[in-house]
Image: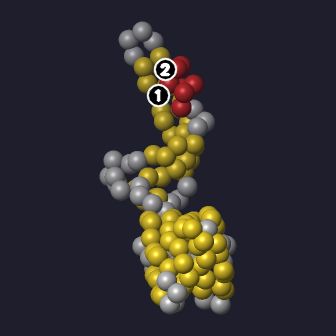
Amino acid sequence: INTMVNWLDGWRMNIILPDDAEHYITGRVSIQPEYNDMAHAAVTVTAICDPWRYSNYETVIALTATEEARPARLTNNGRRTVVPLLTISGDGASVLLVFGTASWMLSAGTYQLPDLVVNQGGADLTYSGTGDLSFSYREALL
């Protein structure tokens, strides 16, 4: 029991609950030994967790830019607002991304744009240029 307490107590962990295998919660675990003798042993495991149930799978939307502007929709079936991680790849990639009143001219690389926010339900944007775009984010429910 001492080994288990030392190994788990105080760590922040992802916890999959038995009644929701599609999501996990995250929180700090606390272990309290109740009793420990040669014949019996018991511990109480508690965790202080975030209110969100995060999807086990990251949402990834892959697009290929062309010279003609194209619309795209970033869906968000969760309730938590997310800021996606954007990766642009390709030799000589240059992408014009327009979201609401904001626009960015981006070359190959990885970006997290604070103004590119995907609320519950999703967000629409347009893109053009050359290169491949990949948006990744994790949806979450209450």
Rendered image: mark on residue 1: 2
Q: Nearer the viewer, residue 72 or 11?
A: 72
Please say if 45 is above or below 25: above
Please report the residue visible at 48 percent of the width from the left and 88 percent of the height from the top: 70
Local packing at callout 2 (Cα closer than 10 Å; few below 14, some 14-19, many 20+) is: some
Picture colour scheme: secondary structure
State which quadrant residue 60 falls in. bottom left
Dot placed on the residue nearer the N-terminal end, 1 or 2: 2
Q: Residue 139 at what x, y percent from top left?
A: 47, 65
Please say if 4 is above or below 94: above
Please report the residue visible at 42 percent of the width from the left and 9 percent of the height from the top: 38
Q: Nearer the viewer, residue 27 or 136?
A: 136
Please say if 77 is above or below 1: below
Is residue 80 something that shows in the picture?
no
Is residue 53 left or right of 92 when viewed as pictured? left
Q: Residue 89 at what x, y percent from top left?
A: 55, 66
Q: Residue 63 at what x, y percent from top left?
A: 46, 75
Residue to which mark 1 is pinned? 43
